[in-house]
Amino acid sequence: MTTNDFIQECKDSGKFNWDQIDEIIFGFLYDNLTIEQIKVFAQLEYKWEQMEQIRKGFENHLTIEQVKVYANPEFSWQQMWEIRKGFKNGLTIKQIKLFAHSKFNDEQMEQIRKFIEENNDMSINTIKFLIGINCI
């Protein structure tokens, strides 16, 4: 399937709104993403702002494995941004998973992310204990 075919298929489905279509087009035309990468966020359950955060992850050279940590419609775009920022700042997937839960709002995620970044030499178990996370 070509890029144009994929875009046309999304348009013809009548299910995506124009903002969502724009994110798909931006991914192909401006970010040079692959169809495999586009398919991660070209899903009806995502609002365009969520699609943008997923697209920006690829734009910033995150792997599909990293992006899939936050490519979840249960996350708001603000929560996705906090997770993406953690990756951008060098956190590992294990560290990210300490706060990548929809039960945390974006402000809570930010606080946990900053704590982990400032205490990067601590073990995962110590960080979990200190911030009271028992979900992993």
Image: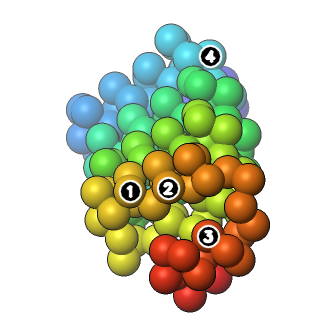
Judged left or right of residue 108, residue 116 is right
Q: Which mark is residue 32?
A: 4
Q: CA distance from mark 3 to mark 2?
A: 9 Å
Q: Which of the marked residues, 3 or 1, is nearer the chain's N terminus?
A: 1
**Label 2 sits on residue:** 115
Residue at 50% in and 55% down = 115
Q: Nearer the viewer, residue 18 or 103?
A: 103
Q: Which mark is residue 111?
A: 1
Label 1 close to label 2 by CB (< 8 Å): yes
Name the image quarter holding residue 64: top right
Residue 69's place in the image compared with 78, above or below, is: below
The one of 20 and 89 positioned closer to us in this rendering:
89
Identify residue for label 3.
Answer: 127
- Residue at mark 4 to residue at mark 3: CA–CA distance: 38 Å
Q: Amino acid at mark 4?
A: Asn
Select label 4 or label 3 by which is in front. Answer: 3
Callout 3: SS: helix
Determine whether 7 is above or below 104 in the image: above
Residue 1 lies, in percent from the top left, at 69, 31
Give the residue displayed 36% in from the left and 70% down from the top.
104
Amino acid type, callout 1: Gln
Instruction: Give the spatial CA distance, label 4 vs label 1.
Output: 33 Å
